[in-house]
Every structure is written in structure tokens, then in C-alpha cells.
Amino acid sequence: MAHISEREHDLPDAVIAKLLRIAVEDKSVVSLGPGEPDMNMPQPIIEEVKRCASKSNHYSPPGGRIELREAIVKKLKKDNNIDANPDNIIVTTGSQEALLLATACSLDVSEQVIIPDPSFLGYLPTFELFNAFPIALELKPEDNWNINPDAMKKLIDKKKTKAILINSPSNPTGNVLPKKILEEIADIAVDNNLYIFSDEAYEKLIYDKKHFSIGALNGMKNNVVTLQTFSKSYAMCGYRVGYAVGPSPLIEAMKKIHIYSTLCAPTISQMVAVKALSLNKSYIDKMVNEYDRRRKMIVKGLNQIGLDTVTPNGAFYTFSDISHLSDDSFKFSYDLLNNGKVAVVPGREFGRFGEGFIRCSYATDYKKIEEALRRIDRFVSKTS
Ligand SMILES: Cc1ncc(COP(=O)(O)O)c(C=O)c1O
């Protein structure tokens, strides 16, 4: 008998995994599915992996090696204008673990957290796993996918709401929240005594705009948990290393649960992460320039095909309107995969307000994106 808990049953199945499996197995498919960089890690990081290989077989102290936490303190000051010390930083197995720990330590059963919708598909199940209650804040293309602070205020329940999650630059919309909106969100959090979980996974992958960390705003030290990662900026997804900086009591609590979840982030990844933080900016600039070149091409192409697409200012995704062609983004994506041989992610994967859209990732070779656009064009012409 295979008993599976109700907790697991209640979690949504990630359709993206199924779609991407088909995309990988069928070599004739061009995939705009993946949510990870297609580029290699910078060469100095590869060299550092070799150098550390024989010295990294031990567990690290739970919460992170001190050398890395000290390097993160400097990075947070320099890049994000956040004042931290090694004690209010926890290094985790990717930033996804940091969100999971923050949830476990700050939200009791049925307490509410406001999340943007559409947003990263990892959020909702994480909150549901801990029986917290996510409240969807609708984002709209006509607002450039920005959060509307007045709409956010209306969702707050004085007794039940405990946290707000924000993600800038955003997956899947590419939105970068302007400082003014961040200030309004900060005021809402302070007035209502809420945590802000600020997911900044794509902080370095940004075009035309500047990334601003809400944790840098005056008086936000006790409210903001900033989540950052090495996955996207350094193409280190597989190394599974991220971190959170936040109020010391919460970070201490997270360290306790961390011991029972993964014990520590991989030691080799933490050693290599120190090297990543010391790299010259030119390594990231090179990646960003290439994403930018693809971004300009894909946004133009999708709009020409008639799939309205707001120009993303960060990350490596476009989020395009298909509502004139289909009211079911799952079916649309499956048909496009089977008949058009292009893999994209259905918008509903990112929340109910993502219905009517598809996400394309441009973390894919330039020529492949061109081919995908030709195929989408043919498919759309036949569908409409
Ligand atoms: C918005 C966002 N946050 C967090 C993550 C998870 O990142 P990590 O590899 O640090 O766990 C992802 C991964 O795709 C993401 O898109």
C-alpha cells in the first residue's frame, strides 16, 4: 500500500515539468521553456570548482560558511545598499529553500500572504505546503505588470495577513518595480506590521532600468527578508546556493529549521560562491548584453505575430497575450508543442490571472529563438 499524504495530494502538479520533458525528448522541438541560463558559468568559477574539489567533502556550518557570509555582507552593501552582518544572513540550498524556511518560520496555519499573480510557480505550493493562505494580487499588462499598491491595501486582513511577497525583476513578466512603488509597499508593510519577502533572484539580469532593493529603504530592517541567489547571475543553478538576509530573530529561526531540511548548502558551492562575488562585473555584463540582444528580437517578433507582449525590463522571459486565440493556455501550449514544435509555458502555471498568456524564455540560443518565432507565426496563422 502506498499511502501518500493529503498535503502532497493538495499540491498542484507542475505542468511545466511534463511539457519540458516532452520538449527534451523530442529533438524536433525548439524549447522556449527553460527557466535557467543557457550560458556557461564564468571561467574563473569553473577553475575554482576544480581547485576546491578535493577540499569540500565536509558539511559546512548550518547557515553558511563564515567566509561566504562575510562576502555577502560586502556585496549587499555595495550592490543593494543593505546593511547586514553575518548573523542576519542564512546561506541555503538555492533561494527556494530560503523562501521555504521563511514561510515555515513566519506563517502559522491559515495565516495569509499576498502574492502577485501571475508570479513564479514555486510560490503558491510553498505557502500551501505549510497551510498558509496565499491571496492573489492581480497584475495587469496595462499597468506594465506593476503592483498596484492601492489594490494591495484592499487585500489586507488586519488579523490574518502576515506577509507580502514581491519579485523584481519578475518571473514571468520581466517587470522591474520602480522605487516609488516599493516605497508604497514598504509603507503598507510597516502600517500593518507585515513581513515583505523580496525575491531578487534576477537582480543582475536587468535592462534599461536599475534594480532597487526594498530592504535598503529606511526603517525596513525588521520587515524585509531579501532572497538572493547565485543561480541566475552566475549561471550556477545546479550548484544550489542562495541566501536570505533579514531580521535576526527570523533568520535564527530559519537556521533551526534549515538543520532539519538540508542541514547545509553544498560546501563546494559555497566555496565557489565566494569566488563568484569577487568577479569583475564584465562577466555579468557580457551575459546581460546577450540576453538584451535576444530580448529585443523576441519582443519585436512576438508583437509582429500579434501576440501582444509588454517589453520586459529584467529576467529572461516574455509574457505574451494569446487570449484572442484561446481561453485555455494549457491547451494552446500543448497544441503549439505537438503541432508547431515549440515549447512554451502556459500562463496559468503562474496563477489564475496568468490565463490567456504564454511565457517564452529567451535563455535560448539566438538562432533557435528566430526559428521558434517562425514556427509560432505559422502556428498562429493556422489557429486564427
Ligand atoms: C523568481 C524566482 N525565484 C526563485 C527561483 C529559485 O531559484 P534558486 O535556484 O535560487 O532556488 C526561481 C527559479 O527559477 C525564480 O524564477
Image: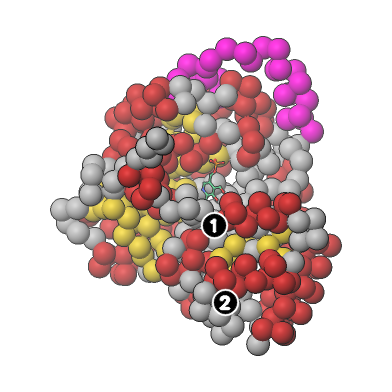
Is residue 140 among the parts visible in the rendering? Answer: yes
Dot 2: within a 10 Å radius of its alpha carbon, few (fewer than 14), some, or many (20 or more) residues? many
> Would residue 346 be found to the left or right of residue 123 on screen?
right
Tell which of 316 and 205 is nearer to you: 316
Q: Point out residue 267 in the picture as x, y percentages from the top left corner.
A: 58, 20
Q: Percent from the top left, x then y, of residue 208?
A: 64, 62
Q: Is residue 299 magenta?
A: no
Residue 205 in view: no
Name the residue located 63 percent from the left edge and 22 percent from the top edge.
268
Instruction: Single out the residue that lies furthest toward the right.
Output: 367
- Find the magenta span and give its range: 43-69
Residue pictured at 40% horizontal, 22% vertical: 259
Residue 321's disc is 2
Q: Is residue 50 magenta?
A: yes
Q: Is residue 3 left or right of residue 307?
A: left
Relative horizontal placement of residue 201, taking residue 272 as reference (left or right): left
- The residue under label 1 is 15
Report, in whole angstroms, how far the alpha carbon at label 1 lies from the one at label 2: 19 Å
Identify the residue at image location x=62%, y=26%.
269
- Give the image's coloring scheme: secondary structure
Q: Secondary structure at mark 2?
A: strand
Q: Is residue 99 left or right of residue 189?
A: right
- Image coords of residue 62 (percent x, y): 45, 20
Q: Quadrant of the N terminus?
A: top left
